[in-house]
Amino acid sequence: MEQDYEKILVPVDGSKEAEMAFHKAVKVAAMNKGHIDVLTVLDTKQFIGLHGGMLNGDVIYQLSEDAQKYLNELKDEAVKDGFDSDKIAIHVRFGEPKTVIATEFVEEYKNDLIMIGSTGMNAVTRLLVGSVSEYVTRNARTDVIIVRTDVDNKTIK
């Protein structure tokens, strides 16, 4: 049975793996005449400074602005390659990336597919806390595709 995906969520974090997932999602959405939600989740744990205090509002605002700029650049790339700008939306959220991606965002936007890059974390971090892609695969209530190759099926180096 063929599955048509109409609402694809692509979480991005600036890594090569996430950008490959984004480009593949654009291709899948174009084939299915679907919509893409591109999401960056700013981990609220990163707002705690070196001495346990919160970072000031200006720093948090700048992080948010930088994320918005990055997402707009990705959207512009897709539109330049012929993807309909009305079929792509960008989102910046604050929270725990694992839960925002796997449950909260998908429930709110009714995505029927998550396309996420394979982990970009180092081995020690994966061992201690696990990767976001592993968590999403185990906990999402929708289909999840882990992207390990680029659009031309070249593997990540």
Image: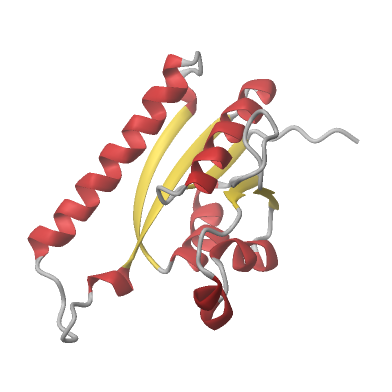
Residue drawn at (20%, 46%), measured in percent from left and top? 65
Of 84 and 148, which appears nearest the observer? 148
- Left or right of residue 143, residue 127 in this image: left
Provide residue 68's location: percent of width, then percent of height.
28, 42
When the figure is inspected, residue 31 is found, relative to residue 46, above or below; the finding is: above
When the figure is inspected, residue 113 is found, relative to residue 6, above or below; the finding is: below
Q: Residue furthest right?
A: 1
Provide residue 10's location: percent of width, then percent of height.
53, 44
Provide residue 26's location: percent of width, then percent of height.
57, 29
Residue drawn at (55%, 56%), measured in percent from left and top? 107
Residue drawn at (42%, 69%), measured in percent from left and top? 96
The number of discs equals: 0
Q: Quadrant of the N terminus?
A: top right
Of 47 and 118, which appears nearest the observer? 118
Residue drawn at (55%, 44%), measured in percent from left and top? 9
Toward which corner of the image does residue 103 lie, by quadrant?
A: bottom right
Q: Residue furthest bottom?
A: 51
When the figure is inspected, residue 95 is found, relative to residue 40, above or below; the finding is: below
Of 18 and 136, which appears nearest the observer? 18
Provide residue 153's location: percent of width, then percent of height.
70, 34
When the figure is inspected, residue 145 is found, relative to residue 55, above or below; the finding is: above
Q: How is the image coloured?
A: secondary structure
